[in-house]
């Protein structure tokens, strides 16, 4: 008989007030060069952003510098933050993965990979750091820096990986294949979808959404069969995101931004010349109000201008923020502040009116503000070394009321499939802490709510 236990954790959030008008500048921070991708936010609110000036910056929420770490070469991908606060970032020219402690000291650096690490690493539920290189290789690195596995992909890799609840790793390839690997790095299945440079998004039912340079947004079932395809007017380079109602948002390179229903039909499109998602860097983000943020050009005027657009769920532009050379994937903090980079090296902090990211299956690039690329929320899951229990029990979460970091203990008297879900008071799924088969024993799950708004 198959045993299955599922239990939920109810989160209570306090309200926030907003003293400034949404869409106005809060502060700027200057790095030395292009910021290619999304900032990440740690549990304490520290903003981590990589620049092409060879540094990873840690910035306080007031815009002051906390520290900077010399990577030795430019970083094109976004940082990813582990459950223990370690920041992982790959470099281009020297092909190394760095692990950096929250205080800015080096934890370790990997051996030089075969090729550049041009995209963002993902973090599996067991802590394995997953990434591909420009020279046809695919790596799994243990949290201590040792190589867990190395596979030959037979294709240069452009897409940042995304990890499903069962541990499957999804990624796109330059030479026309969308591939899935098991958690141990072994091949699972592949599907010809054209050249895929965007990172996939994963829906609540496990559907994988991915854009292709062949002018299509694809929905793929977890078994590798194609669910549907949605034609856009040009290639898709930025990654899709998913709203609370399952709407998929993505931009194409012909300056059109699309909202696509879960069944593959068009909901709306914004066909102004002002929205030009370019390459990986202009993936949207969705806040708790359902507002979608995306950077783009405005070529409707005689002068070239760049904006951050705030778009309502019905497709109407709510506001836009102008800044010279603004470009990149936005990150939305719990207080509603929107962080976004630029091609001139400036990080912008812009006032918002939300309570952080949307409580949706995939609201931003690489899923969450820690940039894990993992459907299963970043947690520390461990088995406690105690006597085996006689019954299935769930202990009171502590501390109670919840702090941003909260611990939940449970006991199993037999092997079972365990699912731990977190819901807010509106009944919306906030995060999935565990979805795995566990043997009899005592367990503790640590939930970090810092990445999720009310």
Image (spheres, rainbow, N blue to C red):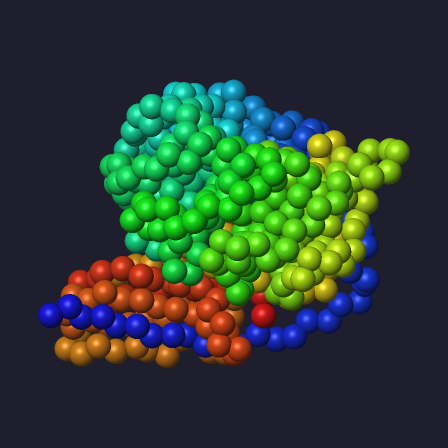
Q: Quadrant of residue 352?
A: bottom right
Q: Is residue 6 visible?
A: yes
Which one is in front, 40 or 106?
40
On the picture, is 356 further left or further right than 125? right
Q: Residue at x 81, y 63 (%)?
A: 20
Which one is in front, 399 or 149?
149
Q: Position of residue 323 (x, y in %)?
A: 80, 41
Which one is in front, 62 or 213?
213
Q: Quadrant of residue 113?
A: top left
Residue with the most extreme right position: 302
Residue 437, above or below 215 = below
The quarter in which the N terminus is drawn is bottom left
Q: Residue at x 54, y 47 (%)?
A: 240
On the picture, is 294 further left or further right than 94? right
Q: Is residue 280 visible?
A: no
Q: Position of residue 102 (x, y in %)?
A: 52, 46
Q: Residue at x 76, y 35 (%)?
A: 325
Q: Residue at x 21, y 77 (%)?
A: 392
- How many labels, in total? 0
Residue 385, above or below 137 = below
Residue 30, above or below 431 = above
Q: Position of residue 266 (x, y in %)?
A: 57, 54
Which one is in front, 301 or 121?
301
């Amino acid at each position: 008989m198959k045993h299955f236990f599922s239990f939920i954790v109810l989160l209570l959030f306090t309200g926030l007030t907003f003293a400034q008008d949404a869409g106005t500048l809060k502060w700027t921070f200057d790095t030395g060069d292009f910021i290619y991708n999304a900032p990440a936010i740690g549990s304490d609110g520290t903003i981590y952003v990589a620049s092409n000036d060879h540094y990873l910056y840690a910035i306080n929420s007031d815009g002051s510098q906390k520290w900077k770490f010399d990577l030795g070469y430019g970083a094109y991908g976004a940082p990813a933050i582990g459950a223990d606060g370690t920041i992982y970032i790959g470099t281009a020219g020297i092909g190394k993965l760095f692990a950096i402690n929250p205080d800015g000291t080096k934890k370790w650096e990997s051996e030089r990979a075969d090729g550049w690490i041009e995209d963002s690493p993902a973090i599996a539920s067991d802590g394995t750091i997953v990434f591909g290189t420009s020279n046809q290789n695919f790596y799994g690195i243990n949290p201590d820096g040792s190589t867990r596995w190395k596979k030959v992909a037979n294709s240069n890799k452009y897409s940042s990986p995304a990890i499903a609840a069962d541990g499957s790793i999804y990624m796109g390839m330059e030479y026309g294949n969308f591939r899935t690997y098991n958690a141990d790095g072994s091949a699972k299945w592949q599907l010809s979808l054209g050249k895929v440079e965007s990172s996939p998004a994963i829906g609540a039912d496990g559907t994988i959404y991915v854009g292709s340079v062949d002018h299509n947004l694809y929905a793929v079932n977890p078994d590798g069969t194609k669910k549907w395809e949605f034609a856009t007017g040009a290639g898709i380079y930025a990654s899709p995101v998913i709203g609370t109602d399952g709407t998929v948002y993505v931009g194409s390179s012909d300056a059109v931004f699309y909202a696509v229903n879960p069944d593959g039909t068009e909901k709306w499109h914004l066909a102004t010349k002002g929205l030009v998602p370019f390459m990986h860097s202009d993936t949207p983000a969705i806040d708790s109000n359902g507002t979608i943020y995306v950077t783009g050009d405005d070529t409707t005027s005689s002068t070239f201008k760049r904006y951050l657009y705030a778009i309502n769920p019905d497709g109407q532009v709510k506001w836009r923020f102008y800044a010279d050379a603004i470009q990149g994937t936005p990150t939305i903090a719990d207080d509603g502040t929107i962080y976004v980079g630029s091609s001139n090296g400036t990080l912008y902090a812009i006032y918002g009116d939300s309570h952080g990211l949307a409580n949706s299956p995939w609201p931003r690039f690489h899923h969450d503000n820690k940039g894990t690329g993992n459907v299963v929320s970043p947690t520390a899951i461990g088995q406690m070394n105690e006597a085996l229990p006689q019954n299935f029990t769930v202990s009171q979460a502590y501390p109670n009321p919840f702090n941003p970091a909260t611990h939940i203990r449970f006991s199993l008297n037999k092997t079972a499939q365990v699912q731990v879900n977190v819901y807010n008071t509106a009944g919306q799924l906030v995060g999935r802490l565990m979805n795995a088969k566990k043997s009899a024993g005592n367990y503790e799950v640590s939930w970090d709510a810092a990445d999720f708004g009310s």
